[in-house]
Amino acid sequence: MKVLKKFFAVVMAAISVFFVVACFESGNTSGTESIGNMDKMTITATSPSNDKTVCLANKTVKEVYVDYVVGKSDELSDGTDKFKGDPVVLKWAAKPAYENYVVNISLSADLKDGKEYETTEPSLVLTDLFVGETYYWQVSSEVDGKTVKSDLFTFKTDASPRTICLDGVSNTRDIGGYKSINGKKLKQGMIYRGGSPDDITESGLAAASGIYSIKTQLDLRTASEAEKGCSFGESVNYINISGAYYIGGKTGLDFESNKSVIADELRVFTEEKNYPVYFHCALGRDRTGTLAMLIEGLCGVSESDILLDYELSSLSVTGTKDKNKISYMINNLFKPTIEYIKGFGDGSLQSGCENFLITCGLTKNEINKIIEIMVA
């Protein structure tokens, strides 16, 4: 009996040792899995889906530019600003969820020259993106001193007009993004057009400097209209040239004494140091639209896109201030001006713009410089 008890005691001791060792090894295995799981942590894009094309224009602007025809905005115009674009909302899923994320977004796959954002949520709202571009983005997070990175994701922005928002200013947009010569495009973030910025707010000023980096204000109003001077602060170059517009009368492009004025306007765009430029008149439609046509036409933008860019003024407060229908303005003033300019060339607007500007006093080198700066 004593032998049997001793045997059971030895067996129980062996079992106890087995459980202790097993528990210890189990604890060690758990720690190893924790380290291994770091490599298995994942961050995946959920919205927009990878390589998806998103529209930056709001519903009203989209309704105008898709299958555009002259006067399409007549029924949509109500005297208010309808330019505010739709944001792109990036969303991702992380396993496990992390406390902080860093999002890198760029126009190049190597993420160089991109922007870095920090957020505590698995989402990020993006505004003021370029149109017609492919964006690359990657999410990362740091856990226990180790960085976990997602794959490289992409999304595309459709080729809509690029409207911008400067609080206190109406009728504002980028003239870039339109197709140009040889399959290229007008650069974005270089030339902005709009109405008078006299009433720009502090928020608008912050956007002008922080988002759009405006360096030059080209004011096309008369000296009496431009009495306030520069609206963007002392660091911005201010140029006031009373602009010519349309044809006919003393303010027209066809009035001989206005040729030097037109040359002076265009010379602003031959100097790289002046960019980005914000140019405007009072409404941002007539003098501004005429100068935009000359720049866009010179750079090979299609007549249809130039008409569209002009017509967008009807979706703003200042562009509709005189209550004129945009179709009337185009058919009776803007189109005849385009035809007048085309008469200087071989029938194309680009050759017409080039030859017309030469008659105004611009040199071939100055013309080429504008194209070199603006077309990419």
Image: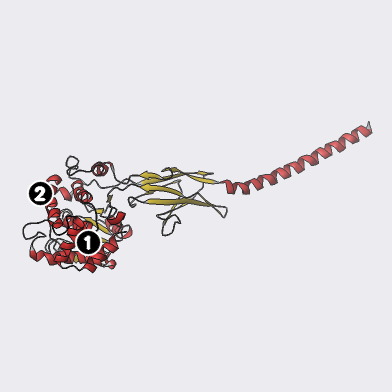
Q: What element carries label 2?
A: helix
Q: Which mark, residue 231? A: 1
User: Cβ–Cβ below 8 Å for labels 2 and 1?
Assistant: no
At 93% from the left edge and 34% from the top edge, which residue is drawn?
3
User: For the residues marked 2 and 1, what is the alpha-carbon distance in whole angstroms?
Assistant: 33 Å
User: Position of 50 compared to 304: left or right?
Assistant: right
Q: In which quarter of the image is residue 276?
A: bottom left
Using the image, determine if residue 300 lies above or below residue 233.
above
At 23% from the left edge and 52% from the top edge, which residue is drawn?
302
x, y percentage for residue 275?
A: 28, 63
**Which callout, 2 or 1, points to the residue nearer the camera?**
2
Q: Name the residue under label 2.
A: 332
x, y percentage for residue 52?
A: 40, 44
Instruction: Return the residue nearer the eye: 342 or 152.
Output: 342
User: Position of 342 compared to 249: left or right?
Assistant: right
Q: Can residue 238 be seen at all in this image of the molecule?
A: no
Q: Is mark 1 on a helix, strand or loop?
A: loop
